[in-house]
Image (tube, rainbow, N blue to C red):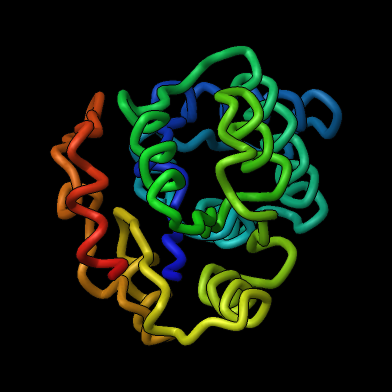
Amino acid sequence: MALIAFDLDGVLYSSEPFLGAAYREAIANVNRDRPGSFARVPSTREILDHIGWPVPEILRRLFPAVDPEAVERLHAETLSVICRRVAAGEGVLYPDVDETLHALRADGYQLAVASNGRTQYVETVLTRYRLAELFIPRVTADMVGDKTSVLRFYVYRLALAADAVVMIGDRTSDVDAAARLAAASSVATTATDIATKSKPPGRWSAASPTCVRPLAA
C-alpha cells in the first residue's frame, strides 16, 4: 500500500495571509522584553521567500547578525503567535482538501504529513480543520531534523520501500527531500501537477484523487 506524504504549507493550508503580521508581532514581543534585539523587521515578501525551510534556518537567514539568545526567543515567540492565529481561524485551508483527503483514505491509501513546520504548528493546523485523524501519527522536522529525515522515518516505521512513497509538495525543499529518499515524488514539483489548484487562494478539485492515484499505484 502506497504512502502519500503531503507538505502542509502551500499544499493543504496557507499561512501566507497572516505570516508577515505574525512575525512582526513576535519581533515586537521580543523587543519589548529585550529592547533593541531586532533593529530591523523583515518585509512580508522577505519572510514568504523563506517559507519551506526549517524555522531555525529561516531565522538564521533573516537575522544573521542578531544575538543567538534573541533569535532563540524569537523562535519560541513566532511559534506561539502563529499557532494562536491558526487556532483562531486565520490562514486558508484550500477548498476541497477535506473531501480529497477523505476520498484517498477511502481508497485505502495511508496519508502522512511531511513538513519542515514545527510539531505544535502542524498539530494546530490539523486540529483546527479536523484533519488529524486522516493522517498516520505525525513525524516532524523538529523531531528528526529535516524533511528528508521525516520521510525516512515514515519508511522505516511502516516498513515500506522508498518507491512506495509519494511526496506531494510545492517547493524545491519537497523535491529535494523526495530525491534524497528516491521516492516516487520526483513527479510532483508543485501541487498543480496533481490537482487543478492555483494559488492564491488555491483550489483542490474533487478530481484530485484521480490525479494522485497513478502516482501512488
Residue found at x 79% / y 30%: 35
Residue found at x 64% / y 82%: 156
Q: Is residue 25 left or right of residue 103?
A: right
Q: Is residue 64 visible?
A: no
Q: How many marks?
A: 0
Looking at the image, which is closer to me, 84 or 204?
Answer: 204
Place of residue 56 in the rendered image (x, y in percent of width and height, measured from the top left): 64, 59
Q: Is residue 67 left or right of residue 53?
A: right
Looking at the image, which is closer to me, 55 or 94?
Answer: 94
Place of residue 2 in the rendered image (x, y in percent of width and height, measured from the top left): 42, 69
For the C terminus, the image quarter is bottom left
Residue found at x 36% / y 68%: 166
Residue furthest right in the image: 33
Residue furthest top in the image: 88
Residue found at x 56% / y 59%: 54
Q: Is residue 100 visible?
A: yes
Q: Is residue 153 left or right of residue 44?
A: right
Place of residue 119 in the rendered image (x, y in percent of width and height, measured from the top left): 70, 49
Image vertical order of residue 175 relative to residue 21, above or below: below
Image vertical order of residue 38 relative to residue 214, above or below: above
For the N terminus, the image quarter is bottom left
Place of residue 191 in the rendered image (x, y in percent of width and height, measured from the top left): 24, 49
Looking at the image, which is closer to me, 181 or 85?
Answer: 181
Looking at the image, which is closer to me, 154 or 29?
Answer: 154
